[in-house]
Amino acid sequence: MKKILFTLFLLSAAMTSMAFDWKPQPNEKLRTDMIAYAETVLRYAKGSAAEPIIRDFVARQKYIADEQPYAWISETHQLVETLKNMYPPKIDDKYFETQMRRHALRLLDYPLHVDNRSKDINAAELEAYNQATNTYLANSRKQVLQWLEQPAPPQGIVDICLIYNMGYLIRTSERTFAIDIRWAGTEAEAQTIAEHADCIFVSHPHGDHYTPMLLKAFEQAGKPVVLPAATLPGFTPSKPAVVIDNTILTARMVAGIEVRCLHGAQEVGVNDSVPNNVYILTFDGWTMLHQGDNENIPIQKKLIDMPVCNLIFAPAWNNIQELLRPAMEAEDADVKPMYFFPTHQNELEHVVRHRESYWELFNRKDRMGNPDFKYPPFVLMDNGESFQISK
């Protein structure tokens, strides 16, 4: 308990100068902030296997700062990868292992918040960012493909793999399906995903939630493609797709999955709203909810009348408490397992201010930082990682 209180004190002190929205920073400031935070993590990790690794990292970054001012970008990624392997995904219990995992993901914020879109960025800094980020994304895609080759889990277990920051592959002993996958790999890799999965769902037509190439691969494999509209930018089905463009409270079967849907929208009231499906999917004894980026918050109140959602995937920036509250008030929700997967951290297609950081995830009261809100058990995952849950 003393160690938890100590780390909370350190984190509070380290964050006093930061605003809720991550502001673009020049390289030197971003690197300096990263090192300061790494030193905070080092103090928390005292006596653990991570301590010498972090100590060596901090010492090296200080030593090479002048001669190699951009090396920290890739080397921070490498440190985070090491820490993630040491402290893999688990249900967050606020003790040492999960605190170290939070720290690792907080460190990841820094190299992913280089202001690569600035017209004034130094060419060497941009090259360092691009190389490090492309390596990070390529390695995560490799992890996903390796996950696909693994055997299905035993009955009663659901295996969850995160792709990018909002897409998931869900696998049980009976089936595998995909939802909201942005795939920046090759066409052959897209075909591999389609071969291994039974169907794919798309919540809404934004580029971080689908890839036309992948949808075409599912079509060619004869697998159902479930869409919120008849066509999406870059993808017009050549075969009949499953189009769900209204709210469905009575289950519809797709590839052995009971599909219910709250048909909402993103960008409500801004020009023409973007259609967004909140999918409630029941399969093999599990019910999951995937919010997409729905901003039509009132429709989410209908969750109180839906089957209890065991697995909830939703971006924490998007009025998350207004989604969780009705889900947790559904009949029997208090006696059935429920797990929350906060999503959409570090969306790299967004400007720096809107690359929703892990720092914001835990320090905004409208996200996961409200001590007065009772959150369900939650799991932090990064791109390419997987996690199994059994009932």
Image: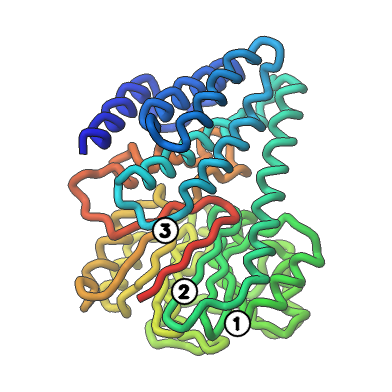
365 left or right of 37 in image? left
Q: Residues within 10 Å of mark 3 (few under 14, many from 20)?
A: many
At which x and y percent is residue 161?
55, 63
Of the image marks 1 and 3, the number of the one nearer the N terminus: 1
Q: Local crowd at mark 1 within 10 Å, few (<14), some, or many (≥20)?
A: some
Q: Is residue 236 above or below residue 46?
A: below
- Pointer 3: what residue? 341
Among the two numbered marks 3 and 2 on one chain, the one whose residue lies closer to the N terminus = 2
Q: Which is nearer the eye, 158 or 244?
A: 158
Q: CA distance from mark 2 to mark 1?
A: 25 Å
Q: How many marks?
A: 3
- Amino acid type of the residue that numbered disc 3 sits on in the rendered structure: Phe
Residues at marks 2 and 1 touching, judged by CB atoms closer than 8 Å: no
Contact between marks 1 and 3 (CB within 8 A): the answer is no
Q: Residue at x 18, y 47 (%)?
A: 372
Crowd rating for badge 2 (residues with CA inside 10 Å; few <14, some 14–19, many 20+): many
Q: In 3D space, how far apart are the residues under numbered discs 1 and 3 (Cα atoms)? A: 26 Å
The residue positioned 25% from the left and 61% from the top of the image is 325
Front position in the image: 237 or 30: 30
Which is more foreground, mark 3 or mark 2? 2
Q: Quadrant of the N terminus?
A: top left
Q: Position of residue 369 (x, y in %)?
A: 29, 42
Q: Identify the disc placed on residue 242.
A: 1
The image position of residue 244, as x and y in percent, is 53, 78
Q: What residue sits 20% from the left and 71% below the top?
A: 334
Q: Amino acid at mark 2?
A: Val
Say which residue appears at 65% left-offset and 15% top-offset: 64
Q: Which amino acid, by three-letter code, is at mark 1?
A: Val
Q: Secondary structure at mark 1?
A: strand
**Res. 24 image quadrant:** top right
Q: Which residue is mark 2?
A: 158
